[in-house]
Image: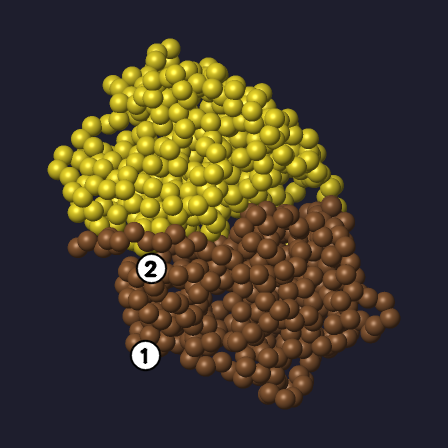
Chain colours: A brown, B yellow
Amino acid sequence: MNHLPTSPTSPARRSLLAGSASALAAAGLAGLHQGALAQAQAQAQAPAAAAAPVAKPLPGYAGWKKADALIVHSSTTIETRRGAFGTSVITPSDQLYVRNNLPTPPESIVADRDAWQLQVEGVRQPRSLSLRELKSLGLETVAMVLQCSGNGRAFFPSKPSGTAWTVGAAGCVIWSGVPVREVVKALGGVSDGGLYMTGTGGEVLPAGLDPKSVIVERSVPLSAMEDALLAWEMNGEPIPLAHGGPLRLIVPGYTGVNNIKYIKQLAFTPRESEAHIMSHGYRISPPGSKGDPSQPSVQEMSVKSWINSPLPEDGGQAAGLVQIHGVAFGGMDAVKGVEVSTDGGKSWQAARLVGPDLGKYAWRQFVLQARLPKGTHVLASRATDARGRVQPETRGENQSGYNNTSWADHAVTVTVA
Amino acid sequence: MNHLPTSPTSPARRSLLAGSASALAAAGLAGLHQGALAQAQAQAQAPAAAAAPVAKPLPGYAGWKKADALIVHSSTTIETRRGAFGTSVITPSDQLYVRNNLPTPPESIVADRDAWQLQVEGVRQPRSLSLRELKSLGLETVAMVLQCSGNGRAFFPSKPSGTAWTVGAAGCVIWSGVPVREVVKALGGVSDGGLYMTGTGGEVLPAGLDPKSVIVERSVPLSAMEDALLAWEMNGEPIPLAHGGPLRLIVPGYTGVNNIKYIKQLAFTPRESEAHIMSHGYRISPPGSKGDPSQPSVQEMSVKSWINSPLPEDGGQAAGLVQIHGVAFGGMDAVKGVEVSTDGGKSWQAARLVGPDLGKYAWRQFVLQARLPKGTHVLASRATDARGRVQPETRGENQSGYNNTSWADHAVTVTVA
């Protein structure tokens, strides 16, 4: 069988679109973000993008990133362009999204990484450990999808406040560090009554505010400790400041906010943190309501996929063979399979999983070879996890636009000439 | 059991050593390299290294790389520092070694990547295909160790000519592209009598020389086609010019030179190429002799490992617990296990494989937790592949210093205070 296209294809090269309108900050932090934005723009050292204009410059702490692979929403919210994912099973650090809840700490905290101190509480022998000491206790490596809780928010018709992420507040990243369980073992085990693992970020808190109202402190169930790391490397390099270096709590399968950057305290606690970001933020609130502790917390991710090529912004696709490809992940469980539709979900074909399997917390690449005739095609992908749970057609409506796994929302419409 | 070190450890931070003496070019190309070096140094835009001085600036085509992670031997030979591998299962592109046999082509060849043409010969329907056409034929991803044939040459006491690589002319890289077998299928299959897959590089050949004497053209057995790719992405990004973009032939398990950069022709041939680099270069020649076609060609890699931490250049190691870690690969076969010695090979302990398994062509990370008392320790690692072949103690002597897999050569001596 001869699969070769017989007519020459037109050289429609990818043109990266300029950033979409930004949605600045979560309620209550807008003022902070504005200030940080002004400061960051003043320091901005973004290299001139050769391929495409960039709507906003990269802030200083992320100035080493590839500007033309990114959409800069604000100084603390930077998204990977859908067309920049390529066929990556690993997202290169310089293309990975950034979402910081508070202004980024000064570069000085990564000047002497090994001197960083972590206080461990709620264990039989609580104490402070330096990063250098942590490095002697164990080493593990995990590949996992890091995804902002609000990734896909832009597809909510209700236009929730918060950054209007499409697909690019996510990446698949390799972390190296010491397993939390090894640290706990070295400190005599979790104290009686410890039901949650609570991480506290080392950001400098703005003066004049109640710390509880702004501090980044999140609790996850103790069971998440089993696979959690205290990580100092990302993709084989010391974790950049923009991504939480020198030390970050990694909770595989949990949304980004639960992976505490610049972690300064790890505590095993009988109750969830009372910080606002835990008690009222990142809750699945019914539309029209505010977050409160009675609502489900945004923690474990669930099965999701999307197509990265072809995309409308690639320009005119020539009729004929095309490799439809994207990424799929299960959150807490491996991906079992992915189906792809070229007719907006009326019919589905099994895609092929390609490339290395980096474990259940990583994403898989998938590809379907299809022959697309002239016309308009709605391409969609639908993943199934190892437990048989299928990515749903529709989003779960909620006030803040969290956890959008809708395959319909993530479909793309391409025109073939 | 409490593993925690009780005394505070001294903050001995890694100081990256300046590059070792360079050994310029292979015989016959020294003049070319000198010229290219002068040109490249004039264009060099290497950023100032914050952490350590760099002996030579990065050449322009590789100026985006991390200078302080690299040893610049010459304009076309750049090595990853052993201390920069960290705990990476994937080598970041900006830390990956470079070894070009000819001066690097101009940046213009990656300006319109999809327009790059590949001539395919020795198939039933020979023709030229654009990269855009290749992209429609298939998609596969492979993680593999890319390693220069001469990696480890610096450990030969005979001091062979050629770059004095220690361990850093190697990396583990993810490639994406179309399987060669899919391209061949689309062109009607290999013509009768095709016993070799022969790739030809698209470098601009210097005027006044017999092309056969300098062209990069290598043949591998037809069996290597099964897993080979024509790749356009590396680590999720379009392949940089320094690494063979826009299109590179990837032959998993084979040493670097067989992975033809800027590939412009792929031919299925009844005989090996008659180019000098194939017939006389990259041969396992007895010490004192020149390469000739009767000698084994440097092609498949074999089982090897080395330790990346702790290293002598890390400075004084404090007595107590240490995680001894490194990388191990089998070449054509997966790694089954790694042993580590802290007494120069007198006794061995099984290390633990950590991190994701990216397939048989990738490397695995390993770690051994050990308690090192004060004194001097010779740390060594010894890998075994899935077929039970064990990394040897000694190197195979040869004139040009190829294929050094000796565990004794790769041992490191650390002093614990």
Q: Is residue B331 above or below residue A26?
A: above
Query: Is A234 displayed left or right of A350 in the figure?
Result: right
The chain identifier of the residue carrying mark 2 reads A
Residue lying furthest left: B192
Q: Is residue A38 above or below residue B323?
A: below
Badge number at residue B367:
none
Classify the position of the N terminus of chain B by image quarter.
Answer: bottom right
Residue A347 placement (x, y as % from top left): 30, 76
Residue B281 placement (x, y as % from top left): 35, 21
Q: Nearer the viewer, residue B383 or B85?
A: B85
2 and 1 marks in contact (CB < 8 Å): no
What residue is drawn where x is 56% and y is 24%?
A: B39
Badge number at residue A318:
2
What residue is drawn where x is 31% and y is 73%?
A: A348
> Nearer the observer, disc 2 or disc 1?
2
The chain identifier of the residue carrying mark 1 reads A
What residue is drawn where x is 44% and y is 65%?
A: A312
Residue lying furthest right: A208
Instruction: Choose top left, top right, bottom left or bottom right for residue B253.
Output: top left
Q: Residues within 10 Å of mark 2 (few under 14, many from 20)?
A: many
Residue B210 placement (x, y as % from top left): 34, 18
Q: Residues within 10 Å of mark 1 (few under 14, many from 20)?
A: few
Residue B44 placement (x, y as % from top left): 61, 31
Task: Please name the residue that numbered disc 1 is placed on.
Answer: A346
Q: CA distance from mark 2 to mark 1?
A: 23 Å
Residue A111 appears in the picture as rendered:
yes
Q: Amino acid at mark 2?
A: Ala
Q: Amino acid at mark 1?
A: Lys
What residue is drawn where x is 39% and y is 37%?
A: B262
